[in-house]
Amino acid sequence: MITEVLVRDRRLRFGVPEDLETRLRGQPILALRRRAKYLIFDLPDGALLIHLGMSGRLHVLEPGQVPPPSKHAHLDVKLDDGTVLRLTDPRRFGMALWADRPVEQHKLLAALGPEPTRTDWSADDLIVACRHRSASIKTVLMDQRVVVGVGNIYANEALFRAGIHPNRAAGRISAPRLRKLHAAVIEVLDEAIIQGGTTLRDFSGADGLPGYFQLSVSVYQREGQPCPTCGTPIRRMVIGQRATFWCPVCQR
């Protein structure tokens, strides 16, 4: 049960709603789930949506072990057992919003593509999404309407494993190669999850530990370094305002 909500700074992305405290107070949390990068706290009357942005953290603070709030502690949600969920976000790119039911029809969730799992997203889905598309395959892969959760680092790594040039037009890639890319995306994401995600300079998980996947990347941020497969120096370019890394020999 949520017993108290304290908003210290509403200046997150989209702003924290003025009525969020009254909507949440006294409501039991029925379930906690994830959709893309959104955390969804299901409540009887709707849901609390939380997005951590680039540097946000949601700390679970045990009863009797709640430290004074830091400068960037924007939101506290206190539960009836004394536990406090504290949202901190130095860059304020995160969000805390209310969603009416049905939650999936909220404007931020309604247009999202499938989750990048073998159950929810098939190779045929990717093939259809690429059909007749002149956009680069990296752009299509990072389109949240096509599939969610494939960020810049993972797109770079999956394209390298599949041997596909990131700037190749999506509609000009054969079905067998797209099937290989589909498998590579799921493989890369599975490995990243096992290794705890990918660490930004100021990121840590709920357990306070950083992610380690960035330690094992093959091409991302390795411009000028030898390709782990053929030894050719990795190159860099910009696609869709995002840094893109590839091997000029292994990827075509």
Image: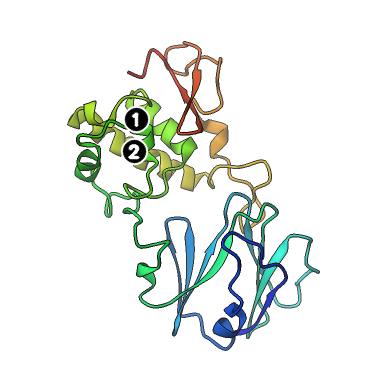
Quick one: label 2, few (<14), some, or many (20+) residues within 10 Å? many
Q: Is residue 166 above or below residue 230?
A: below
Which picture quadrant has residue 169? top left
- Name the spot of residue 107 as percent of width and height, x first: 40, 64
- Disc 2 is placed on an element classified as helix
- Disc 1 is placed on an element classified as loop
Q: What residue would you read off at disc 1?
A: 136
The kind of residue on which mark 2 rests is: Val
- Name the spot of residue 207 as percent of width and height, x first: 63, 57
Give the camera-side residue of 132 and 217: 132
The kind of residue on which mark 1 rests is: Ser
Q: Disc 1 to disc 2, how far (Cα)?
A: 6 Å
Where residue 79 is drawn, which disc sits there? Answer: none
Q: How many marks?
A: 2
Q: Is 221 left, or right, of 64 in this rendering?
A: left
Q: Is residue 32 above or below residue 161?
A: below
Quick one: label 1, few (<14), some, or many (20+) residues within 10 Å? some
Name of the residue lying farthest toward the right? 68
Which picture quadrant has residue 45? bottom left
Asked if the residue at tag 2 contacts the one at tag 1, i.e. Cβ–Cβ closer than 8 Å, the answer is: yes
Where residue 140 is drawn, which disc sits there? Answer: 2
Residue at horizontal 34 percent and vertical 35 percent from the top: 184
Q: Quadrant of the C terminus?
A: top left
